[in-house]
Amino acid sequence: MNSVNPYEYGLPRDAANFQALSPLSFIERAASVYPQRLALINGRFRQTWGQTYERSIRLASALAKRGIGVGDTVAVIAPNGPAMFEAHFGVPMCGAVLNAINTRLDAETIAFILQHGEAKVLLVDKEFGGTVQRATSHLPNRPLIVAIDDPEYDQGLLIGELEYEALLAEGDADYAWQLPDDEWQAIALNYTSGTTGNPKGVVYHHRGAHLNALSNAMCWDMTRFPVYLWTLPMFHCNGWCFPWALAAYVGVSVCLRHVRAEAIYPAMAEHGVDHFCGAPIVLNMLANASPELKALKTRPVKVLTAGAAPPAAVIESMEALDFRVTHVYGLTETYGPSVACEWKTEWDDEAPDQRARLKSRQGVRAPLLDGLMVADPETLEPVPRDGQTIGEIMMRGNVVMKGYLKNPTATAEAFKGGWFHSGDLAVWHEDGYVEIKDRSKDIIISGGENISSIEVEDVLYRHPQILEAAVVAMPSERWGETPCAFVTPKPGVTLESQAVIEFCQQRMARFKVPGAVVFCDLPKTSTGKVQKFVLREQARALAADKNL
């Protein structure tokens, strides 16, 4: 009997029929097919795809001439703009790994990231020159610092050995860059927020970046030639892989240095923006903008939102303004969004508030995520699809990180049992949609009953005079824990805590109603997430003062 597999015999894997997946192929195609199409808008600056491709090649060539290659890290601290966008292509074109660093971090954290990631080169916009100067002043292995100068920004401090344009001038436009031989090769390094210790370095590979760029665009029904507004930082999960997706779809990137309603609405009107991504805090800001700003928007705009579970009331407000909201979910470890709340036509006739509640669920696996489940974190047994039993969200597939840099213990723990453990607690609905109830550390246990802080926050956001809200556990001698609400009223509004409590009593079970309401500005991380660990400390102090 012939033991040779006929589907292997004489059918070799060859350069003619196999190529490692990489998002770098997207920009080569965009530039060769549509070289004159607009790629970047940054204030008065305009740049085509042909120009963007050439500048990316020059960046790769210049880095290679300075000895940068496979296994080397090139860090960038810059706002959404041409240099940051070009780095997403030019850095991996020479084989190096892009480390886009959060611009809102303090000098000490930046120093840790540069040292841990062993950055050989650091591109830094002058807005952040002072912070980076402090961060690098005592580094034992100081990277080559390259200054990015935006002529339309007249503040900040230019630091470094040379300027970005001078670095590009060192490069050759005919540099023969190549796609990686192995799609498992690292393309990017992103650090987690690190609110309870040093951040962890999440490593992305070319395959995952290629696939998630397409996956996010697919679940958004993005079509060719989108006009995309950058409110989402490109340093956050590489802008959810959208620099690469926009190359695949030959879109226009409309860049903003600062994310403010006063800049967003005029940009939408001027450039015909039809897509943008943003955290719920950005949506809330737009929903509460002045009527004059809102009036500037005259066409539908698609919105992809994630970062924290968006309150249904915020989604409802955005939909009323003809923003077409798609809710997605993911983590730094999954290249950004990898789960999407796919909309079904049978929901079209639902009332607006019910539509918003359906959209506020995290959803189902995105097109190119292979596995998603809600399960017991110890046994890995899936929970019943009853919308009540709480388990941990787990994912697996090509759009899960390569692992944590220099941290095999944390990597093994995250991948225990062949699934990535998200740390997010959720229920699984009968229709297969998952819905987050809390981070594992944020669930409130009162009198033996689990209370979702997100559920209580969702009710608070429905109060017409509340701008922002966050709920954490407060110690209680009687119940063990009880919810404590931290609330930011809308400008010019005076609220009483009892009125807020009564509002909640009318809309939820009594044991879920906050035991205390604190009015304040919510403390946030550099990526806009509420720092609940800070609020928990305040709640503990409040409970001690009141002897609860």
Image (cartoon, rainbow, N blue to C red):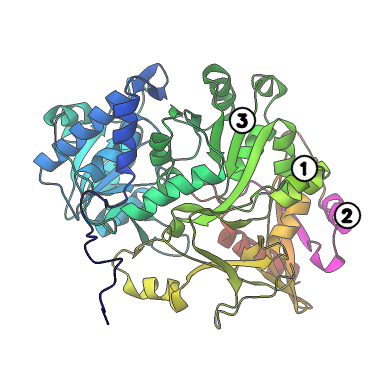
Instruction: For marks 1 and 3, give the one nearer the viewer.
Output: 1
Quarter of the image where the C terminus is located: bottom right
Q: Specify whether 352 is left or right of 381.
A: right
Query: Magenta stretch containing residue 516, yes or no?
Result: yes
- Distance, label 1 to label 3, CA atoms, is 18 Å
**Residue 226 shows in this picture:** yes
What residue span does the magenta drawing correspond to? 497-522
Relative image position of residue 493 (x, y in whole percent): 78, 37
Q: Which mark is residue 301?
A: 3
- In the image, 383: left or right of 398? right
Mark 2–mark 3 CB contact (< 8 Å) = no
- Which residue is nearer to you in this view: 303 or 45? 303
Q: Nearer the viewer, residue 221 or 525?
A: 221
- Residue type, numbered disc 2: Glu
**Separation of marks 2 and 1 at Cα, in angstroms:** 33 Å
Residue at the disc numbered 1: 348
Task: Using the rendered image of the protein, determine whether residue 462 is visible from the camera's viewpoint.
Answer: no
Q: Is residue 198 left or right of residue 98?
A: right
Q: Position of residue 269 (x, y in %)?
A: 58, 19
Can you say whether 478 is above or below 180 in the image? Answer: below
The reply, left or right, for residue 210 in relation to residue 346 is left
Check the image and report above or below for 243 versus 55.
below
Q: Which mark is residue 502?
A: 2
Q: Quadrant of residue 184?
A: bottom left
User: Marks 3 and 1: in contact by CB < 8 Å?
Assistant: no
Question: How would you rate the neighbour count of disc 1 (Cα within 10 Å): few for under 14, some for 14-19, many for 20 or more?
Answer: few
- Residue found at x 62% / y 59%: 535
Residue 152 circle label? none
Mark 3 Cα shell of 10 Å, populated few (<14), some (14-19), many (≥20): many
Front residue of 290/140: it is 290
Residue 26: quarter of image: top left
